[in-house]
Amino acid sequence: MSTSDEIKKIRIKKIEELKKDGKELYPSHCFKNKTISDILKNFSSFSKQKKNSWIAGRIMNMRFHGGIAFIDLRDESGELQIVIKKENIKDFDSLEKYLDSGDFIEVRGYPFKTKRGEKSLLVKEWRIISKSLRPLPSEWYGLKDSEERFRKRYLDLILNQDVKKRFELRSLIIKTMRDFFNNKGFLEVETPILQTLAGGATARPFKTRLDTLNIPLYLRIAPELYLKKLIVGGFEKIYEIGKNFRNEGIDKTHNPEFTMLELYWAYADYQDMMGFIEDLLVYILKNALPKTKNPLLVNYNGQLINFTPPYPKVNFLDIIKEEMKVDPLTVDEKNILSFLQNKGVDITSEMRQYNKWELFDEVYKKVHLEKMIQPTFIIHHPVALSPLAKLRKENNEETERFQLVVGGIECVNGYSELNDPIDQARRFKIQEKRRKAGNKEAPQYNSDFVEALEYGMPPTAGVGIGIDRLVMILTNAPSVKEVIFFPFMRNK
């Protein structure tokens, strides 16, 4: 039997003894009327008045010295030492006998300072409100393996306050984004997660089934097509923050389930949207992150990133020219595969089926991307990589598309939306051919969306922001697993 199992057995015995004594160990009602931060903020006045308050929280540590118990109590707002003297309560002996670290208790008392000057609460009454069966790991003992931290995130949050602060900051970043959009007149909407066709992005979907109608369904890879139907329906400024699902690899920037922001702005184009994104990031940095001398400077992965606009713009094909030292329009697939192989990229059987434009995307992502540390817009992606983006008037092989790269990570993807139904239908058919040829990420032909476009959609700019990746960079996290409460983990 493990030490943990032995401790659990002992604690169950304590529970049985307490229940025999008539103690209610898991009450539904609590007397708590103050948080620990309330006590600390009003310490001086409460201590002068000897004002009694009820506080509650988890026992983090206990020390007994004769007839005095010192207990470190923690709630969501902070931590406070509580002091229980034998002379003040009737059941003092029960404290050491029945209480354990990890238990939740509530206590009534008033604040005072110990002889050492430590702010504390002198307890007059106490009771257990949730008895724990398992011991908390001592300082990272048993949680040194990062996989265990992610599998048992609840313990990670208890033991590491920096982790908790990162998730609080994540929530504040999302709130700040909503404030920015709402102040700009955008309406938050919701669209289906279960979809009859997986569209709006180039990705492999998860497939499921609706038994009632006996039809296949997909978890959405993006909300894009539904959101653009709302633009057709007359909304002009909309956004959605929600989950997307892609049946893809897992690494430091990918999780099969992730949080995405998509926003659509009628009568705007990709140039307007790039300026909008710059304004958004400045707003987040000034209003969500901890105050610093220069809020637009962020440390990520040992690099100082400067978010001061404007951000440089680099043409996608210029990156290919720079890396391969060839003319992208004349090079063939064989030479691109050879280049990738020489750069140490594993060539999969699927990649051997890619056309040159898809292979250029591999060059960009696997060879060049990590070199781009400062915020940079990659613009004018080839049409073959952008089936939903509008063509450039200056060059019909390129689109009015952009991606924002920060810290070697793609965080934002946007473009002037294709609103020509005839061109959209033609591109869907091209993608459908790629799909039938074996590319499982190519989008399916979506006749319902094409029909919606046939009723007319105004010129529109759209953008998607990877929330997890953005938070990862702004909180200096080494992986998206650090900013997702429960990242996907392989079964033990």
Image (spheres, rainbow, N blue to C red):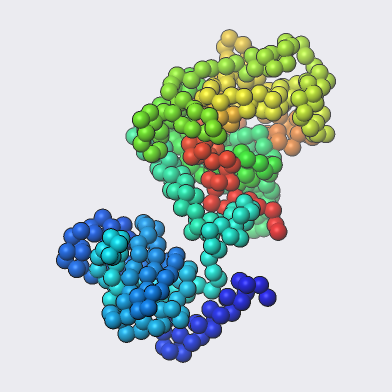
Residue nearest the observer in this picture, 21 or 186: 21
Please indicate, yes or no, whether residue 127 appears anywhere in the rendered image. Answer: no
* Residue 188 position in % (x across, y down): 42, 41
Q: Classify residue 413 by image quadrant.
A: top right
Q: Quadrant of the N terminus?
A: bottom right
Q: Quadrant of the C terminus?
A: bottom right
Please indicate, yes or no, whether residue 163 appears anywhere in the rendered image. Answer: yes
Residue appearing at x 46%, y 31% in the figure: 298
Residue 264, above or below 175: above
Residue found at the very far left of the displayed protein: 49
Q: Classify residue 403 by image quadrant.
A: top right
Q: How many marks?
A: 0
Residue nearest the observer in this picture, 388 or 43: 43
Residue nearest the observer in this picture, 461 or 216: 461
* Residue 391 position in % (x across, y down): 59, 17
Residue 413, above or below 168: above
Residue 368, above or below 446: above
Whether residue 354 sits left or right of residue 263 in the image: it is right
Residue appearing at x 52%, y 33% in the figure: 300
Residue found at the very far bottom of the displayed protein: 20
* Residue 160 position in % (x across, y down): 49, 54
* Residue 77 position in % (x across, y down): 36, 56
Residue appearing at x 57%, y 21% in the figure: 378
Whether residue 85 sits left or right of residue 143 in the image: it is left
Residue nearest the observer in this picture, 475 or 426: 475
Whether residue 10 sits left or right of residue 31 in the image: it is right
Whether residue 425 sits left or right of residue 235 in the image: it is right
Residue appearing at x 76%, y 11% in the figure: 330
